[in-house]
Image: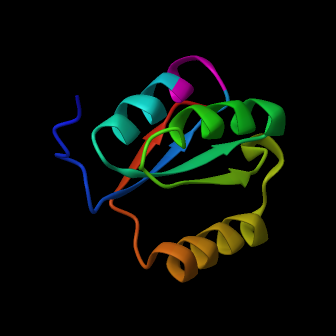
Amino acid sequence: MSSGELSDTVILVTGAANGIGAAVAKAYAAEGATIVLLDKDVPGLEKTYDAINTSSTPAAIYPLDLKGAGIDDYRDLVNTLETEFGRLDGLVHCA
């Protein structure tokens, strides 16, 4: 049962395709957070996304390989977060 303590928060989780990142994303979503799932593994992101979206908590996928990312990639990420969510309340870096 969710306490909803994180409702009205937007949290970006890197490494969200599997392992600790996926577990953190699912746990935060269970508490009501809107989760932005970031990883280079698109099939893994889709699996995490499907697990989260079985609840009423919204989630979004943002595929990005942090190892090869450049300044323009990070600008695009910031612009997407601002446009789609209006803010970012937290970042959990598991990549």
Picture quarter containing residue 65? top right
Q: Is residue 14 above or below residue 56?
A: above
Picture quarter containing residue 62? bottom right
Q: Any magenta on residue 19?
A: yes
Q: Is residue 66 above or below residue 44?
A: below
The residue at 58%/17% (across/down) is: 19
Across and down, in percent, residue 88 comes to 40, 65
Direction from residue 3 to residue 56 in the image, left or right: right
Residue 42 seen in the current view: yes
Quarter in which the N terminus is drawn: top left
Q: Which residues are magenta?
A: 18-22
Q: Main secondary structure of the magenta part?
A: helix
Quarter in which the C terminus is drawn: top right
The residue at 37%/29% (across/down) is: 27
Across and down, in percent, residue 87 comes to 40, 73
Direction from residue 19 to residue 65 in the image, left or right: right
Closer-to-camera residue (50/5): 50
The residue at 71%/37% (across/down) is: 45
The residue at 20%/45% (across/down) is: 4
User: Which residue occupies the extreme top position in the image?
Assistant: 19
Across and down, in percent, residue 70 comes to 78, 61
Closer-to-camera residue (72/14): 14
Q: Any magenta on residue 69?
A: no
Direction from residue 82 to residue 32 in the image, left or right: left
Residue 16 seen in the current view: no
Across and down, in percent, residue 85 comes to 47, 73
Q: Is residue 73 above or below residue 41?
A: below
